[in-house]
Amino acid sequence: MNVLVVDDDFMVARLHTRYVSATPGFSVAGVAHSGAEALRAVDRLRPDLVLLDVYLPDMDGIEVLRELRAAERPDAGRQPVDVLFITAARDAGTVRSALRAGALHYLIKPFSASALQEQLRHVASLRSRLESLDEARQEDVDRIFGTRPRGSRELPKGLAAHTADLVDRILREHPGGMSASECAEAGSLSRVSARRYLEYFAETGRAEVTLRYGGTGRPERRYRRLG
């Protein structure tokens, strides 16, 4: 996925460029240091994602995003670009404006490399889900938007919230995926218990399951956290 980094601070832009380049599946298409430069770069480079600061010398990032969306409407052949705000702006009004303008997420500075990389992986996961959909079911929409009615998040009978949180944390710490046995060992759980929580996460869209085939016997089920 090609990324345009937009920040008026040259050193910060260089740091974010390094974070992006270190994330598998992502590359830096270009860097811009003003709103006007960002608009020209998007038009020229057509990146998949823009990392956009709010505080720019000529216009704020919210205005940049609005202009990007306005340019997309009359051009049916133009692929819409996703935008992730990375900014020190903390006031609620700016956050609301970013959301309403069409930002995917909002990351407040300062943050670690892992925090940005997690958001990048989340963006890649969202794009993958959207591209694989032909017709969306409600549960598909809930997963993409990350919002569900409160009742749909209630754990089934026999599952405990603290153990679910533990398994979720273990999955976060192993982004490459893991088996039920590995999860059980990491959390000091029984394999059967770990498997129940992992399967629940898979059923509710919080994890995906892949099969690893060995020499003989059943393939190993491996779980990776989504989002």
Image (tube, rainbow, N blue to C red):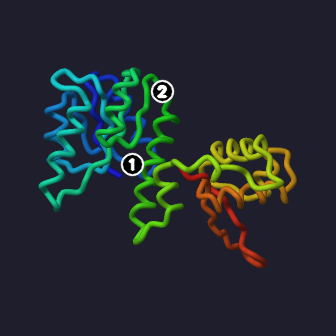
Q: What element carries label 1?
A: loop
Residue 188: name its quadrant: top right
Say few, some or many: other residues with alpha carbon within 10 Å of mark 1 (under 14 / 14 to 19 / 20 or more): some
Q: What element carries label 2?
A: loop
Q: Give the amino acid type for the residue marked by disc 2 in the picture.
A: Phe
Residue at 76% from the left image edge and 51% from the top image edge: 183
Q: Where is residue 182 in the image (x, y as percent from the top left)?
A: 77, 53
Question: Separation of disc 1 and disc 2 at Cα?
Answer: 19 Å
* Residue 51 vertical position relative to residue 87 in the rendered view, above or below: below
Q: In this view, does 30 lie to the left or right of 19?
A: left
Residue at 15% from the left image edge and 34% from the top image edge: 37
The residue singled out by tag 2 in the image is: 111
Q: In this view, does 141 lie to the left or right of 205?
A: left
Residue at 35% from the left image edge and 34% from the top image edge: 85
Could you say which is closer to the camera, residue 180 or residue 15? 180
Residue 10: name its quadrant: top left
The residue singled out by tag 1 in the image is: 26
Q: Position of residue 111 (x, y in %)?
A: 48, 27
In primary-sequence order, the first of circles 1 and 2 is 1
Could you say which is closer to the camera, residue 146 or residue 182? 146
Say few, some or many: other residues with alpha carbon within 10 Å of mark 2 (under 14 / 14 to 19 / 20 or more): few
Q: Where is residue 89 in the image (x, y as percent from the top left)?
A: 36, 22
Could you say which is closer to the camera, residue 57 or residue 156? 156
Q: Give the amino acid type for the residue marked by disc 1 in the picture.
A: Phe
* Residue 213 vertical position relative to residue 95 in the rendered view, above or below: below
**Mark whose residue sits in front, 1 or 2:** 2
Q: Where is residue 154 in the image (x, y as percent from the top left)?
A: 69, 49
